Amino acid sequence: TVLNVSALKDLKDGSTVNLDSLVKDGIVTSPKHPLKMLGNGELTVKNLTVQASAFTASARTKIEAAGGTCETLD
């Protein structure tokens, strides 16, 4: 499952984001693969904790610039 940081725009500041939470929030509808975050678009939500199997360098930079953290899952 590939997702751009711009898809996180409607989440609350300080949220924890992972594949389960994205399905619950209706952002991802059919998760078939581990989550990979891409850096396309703007990230306006602050202080997110994003748990994914992989992050592009630009996604990691944008998440961390917004005060968030990136946790790489096995």
Image (tube, rainbow, N blue to C red):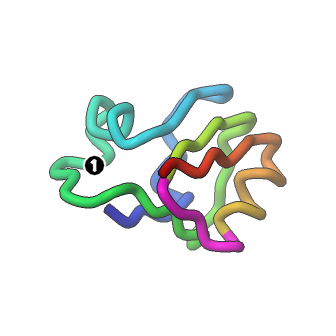
In front of the other: 33 or 21: 33
Q: Nearer the viewer, residue 19 or 11?
A: 19
Q: Is residue 61 left or right of residue 18?
A: right
Q: SS for tag 1?
A: loop
Considering depth in this image, is 41 or 55 the residue closer to the camera? 55
Q: Is residue 40 above or below residue 20?
A: below
**The residue stretch that appears in magenta:** 53-58
Asked whether, in this view, residue 12 is left or right of residue 74, the answer is: right
The part of the image, by quadrant, that contains residue 49 is: top right
Residue drawn at point x = 73 percent, y = 38 percent: 46
Does the segment drawn in magenta span residue 56? yes
In this rendering, would 28 be left or right of 58? left
Q: Does the stretch in magenta take in 34? A: no
Q: Which x, y percent locates residue 30?
A: 16, 51
Q: Residue at x 65, y 65 (%)?
A: 59
Q: Residues within 10 Å of mark 1 (few under 14, many from 20)?
A: some
43 and 38: which is toward the camera: 38
Residue 12 location (% of width, % of height): 57, 28
* Residue 7 drawn at (x, y percent): 46, 54
Quarter holding residue 47: top right
The amino acid on which the numbered mark 1 sits, given as a three-letter code, is Val
In the rendered image, residue 62, in percent from the top left (x then y), is placed at 73, 60
Q: Quarter of the image containing the N terminus?
A: bottom left
Q: Residue at x 83, y 53 (%)?
A: 65
Residue topped by disc 1? 28
Considering only vertical position in the picture, is 73 above or below 26?
below
Residue that appears at 66% across and 29% down:
13
Count all numbered tags in the image, as a single digit: 1
